[in-house]
Amino acid sequence: MTDRRVERAPAPEEGAAIRIDDLVVDYGRKRAVDGLNMTVPRGAVYGFLGPNGAGKTSTIKTLMGFRGPNGGSAEVLGYDVVEESLEVRARVGFASEVNSLYEGMTVPRICRLCRDLSRSWDQGLVDRYIGVFGLPEDARIRKLSKGQKAQLQLCLALGSNPELLILDEPTSGLDPVARRAFLKVLVGEVAAEGRTVFFSTHLLSDIEAVADTVGIIKGGKLLVSGDLDDMRESHRVFRVVYAEMPPEEEVRSLHTLPDVQEVEREGRGIKLRVRGDVEHVERGLRERPHPVIDVDSTGMSLEDIFVAYVEDGDGR
């Protein structure tokens, strides 16, 4: 299979890959997305995080034009998701944890179907990814494992040579070997080519393995968004060891320091969770009125950062 067809309308001016402004999505009386504002830069590998029911899938369905918003707006690659949904879908590769493949088809047959439905199709690219995953071309899809089906969905999503990949829980339920192979292609093959990848998952280890930018959503609102390395650097745990047991008023005063989120006693020391200007906090801790023996800090894991934001909605 070597068919290649390219027919694209001119793209809008360069800008954000995804731009969401005050987006509202309702299901009856339930508000799934509540005034969401978010920007995904082009070329980013963006991890979209949130607890179950946070509004991740509802946001993605709206971006793909599968349902209309109840308020606000969204653009994908500069195209309005309502007025220009066909242009969005022509330029975006999409895959989700829901198996939407026709189980009775073989791999070549479903490739031909996707080719016929696509404005542009690069079968050579699809064949290359099928080879990377080692998928059996002659088997019917029902015979493939869950991991192989997820890998096939990614191959098909890449078939139109998309500018943007949107993936909704793509590795959910996969075994560790299949997940590693999937993520290796996502980073080593896809992101390395400069494509934008936007994916939701509840597996934080997947985010840490591939993402450079992260957004955390809860209750349909964005709690935080930014560079993952910067986020780790600005969220740290300090441990302060005093020359003697610090009095209670010292503990209370630490609660009032700017950027200190949580204070906890640890024997003769105190542990503080900090978000913000960590260098300023460290200088202040070394200059406490009560004699301090040592101050050290460690970066917070993505899991700790995620829990801190989600537990009470703003990370405080």
Image (spheres, helix red, strand yellow):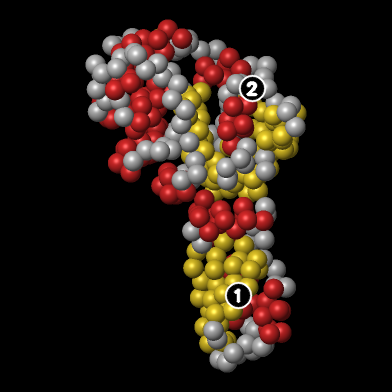
Q: The N terminus appears in which quarter of the rendering?
A: top left
Residue 29 placed where, x, y %? 75, 32
Name above or below for residue 43 compared with residue 152: below
Residue 253 visible, this orientation: yes
**Amino acid type of the residue that numbered disc 2 sits on in the rendered structure:** Arg
Residue of label 1 = 264
Label 2 neighbourhood size at 10 Å, few (<14), some (14-19), many (20+)? some
User: Residue 67 bears which disc, if any?
Assistant: 2
Residue sitting at 57 percent across and 42 percent down?
52
Q: What kind of element bears circle 1?
A: strand
Q: Residue at x 57, y 16 (%)?
A: 87
* Kind of element beneath mark 2: loop
- Residue lying farthest to the bottom in this orientation: 244
Q: Residue 207: horizontal and vertical position, in percent?
A: 46, 46
CA gap, disc 2 and disc 1 = 46 Å
Q: Could you tell me residue 240's position as x and y percent?
A: 56, 80
Q: Nearer the viewer, residue 205 or 46?
A: 205
Task: Give the residue displayed 47% in from the left and 28% down from the top.
Answer: 98
Instruction: Residue at 40%, 10% (x, y): give it.
Output: 113
Q: Is residue 24 visible?
A: no
**Quadrant location, the C terminus:** bottom right
| The one of 281 and 150 positioned closer to us in this rendering | 150
x then y, percent, for residue 196: 49, 33
Image-based side of 230 in relation to 171, left or right: right
Of the residues shown, which amino acid type is indicated by label 1?
Glu
Q: Is residue 289 left or right of residue 299?
A: right
Name which of mark 2 and mark 1 comes first in the sequence. Answer: 2
For label 1, count other residues whose C-alpha is less than 10 Å away and answer few (under 14), some (14-19) or many (20+).
Answer: some
Above or below — where is 205 with respect to 122? below
